[in-house]
Image (cartoon, rainbow, N blue to C red):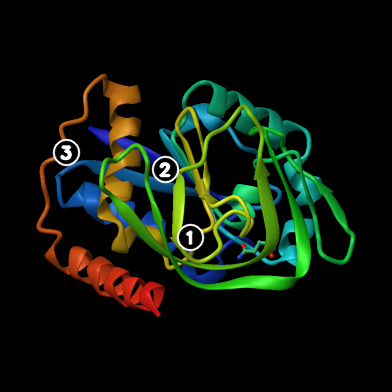
Amino acid sequence: MKLNICHLYPDVLNLYGDRGNVTCWEQRLRWRGIEVQTTGVPIGTPLHAADYDLMFLGGGQDFEQEVLLADLAGAKTAELKAAIEDGMPLLAICGGYQMLGAYYETWDGHRCDFTGALDLYTVGQKERMIGNYLYTCDELQGVTVVGFENHSGRTHLGSGVRPVGKVLFGSGNNGQDGTEGARYKNVFATYSHGCLLPKNPQIADLLLRWALERKYGTADLAPLDDQLEIQAHNYMEQRLRKAMKK
Ligand code: GLN
């Protein structure tokens, strides 16, 4: 078995070391004896989505999101939308998450028309949402997610998508409706830097499972010794739950 990972815009979207999510996937596959190959698709490189089994899109500042606008429009957007509709598992973090929506209006009024692949939009405000945060992952009963958020954008979900879960501590999508992230087909979009996957191994394996099932019709992921990962997760969760009680 082999999985081909596409790391989209590794050159401009890697805020807070989001590339660590790809490294986490690679290692969790290698530990299970599953071959993995990651290909970066930077600005100026065509995207052939059918070559891949799993995609990653990291976060970036407003400036980087505007830098890649021209490159994203047209063929890359069409490839991305077709892949998502075809069930491509995709993890998108913060700026990458926003790029899946119709548009992102920066706090100082720049309108970035994005892919429209997911039914959502984002409007920035001068006051940023920054900090460690905690939320539920509604499709994984009892699973919480710890992350770090730093965004000006307030994301609003349309009827075509559902949130990943409910915010327990922190801001999440917009600091108002109590939602965090967006789920649509095999897209898992979230504001969680951190980076996300090493401290949330169930989320890492959730997307690996989707990719294996889609490619091979089965996903036999042997359990790993996730003691360290769970300790890191629980340390942060306990810290945030203490803060919730204050
Ligand atoms: N530039 C976007 C915002 O400020 C995304 C930030 C990020 O990726 N951390 O909302």
**Residue carrying label 3:** 221
Q: Does residue 67 appear in the picture of this structure?
A: no
On residue 115, the disc is: none
Q: Amino acid at mark 3?
A: Leu
Q: Quadrant of ligand 1?
A: bottom right
Q: Do the CB atoms of the residues marked 2 and 1 lie less than 8 Å apart? A: no
Q: Quadrant of the N terminus?
A: top left
**With 2 as the anchor, is 228 left or right in this view?**
left
- Give the class, few, some or many, for how many residues have Cα within 10 Å of label 2's Cα (few <14, many ≥20): many
At x 61% / y 51%, what residue is drawn?
A: 96
**Residue carrying label 2:** 5
- Give the class, few, some or many, for how many residues have Cα within 10 Å of label 3's Cα (few <14, many ≥20): some
At x 40% / y 58%, what residue is drawn?
A: 21
Q: Do the CB atoms of the residues marked 3 and 2 lie less than 8 Å apart? A: no
**Residue carrying label 1:** 192
Q: Quadrant of the C terminus?
A: bottom left
* Residue 22, percent from left and from top: 39, 55
- Distance between the Cα atoms at labels 3 and 2? 17 Å
Q: Amino acid at mark 2?
A: Ile
N-terminal of the pair, mark 3 or mark 2, is 2
Q: Amino acid at mark 1?
A: Ser
Could you say whether the residue bearing mark 2 is in a helix, strand or loop? strand
Q: Nearer the viewer, mark 3 or mark 2?
A: 3
Q: Nearer the viewer, mark 3 or mark 1?
A: 1
* Residue 160, percent from left and from top: 61, 27
Could you say whether the residue bearing mark 1 is in a helix, strand or loop? loop
Number of numbered discs visible in the structure rendering: 3
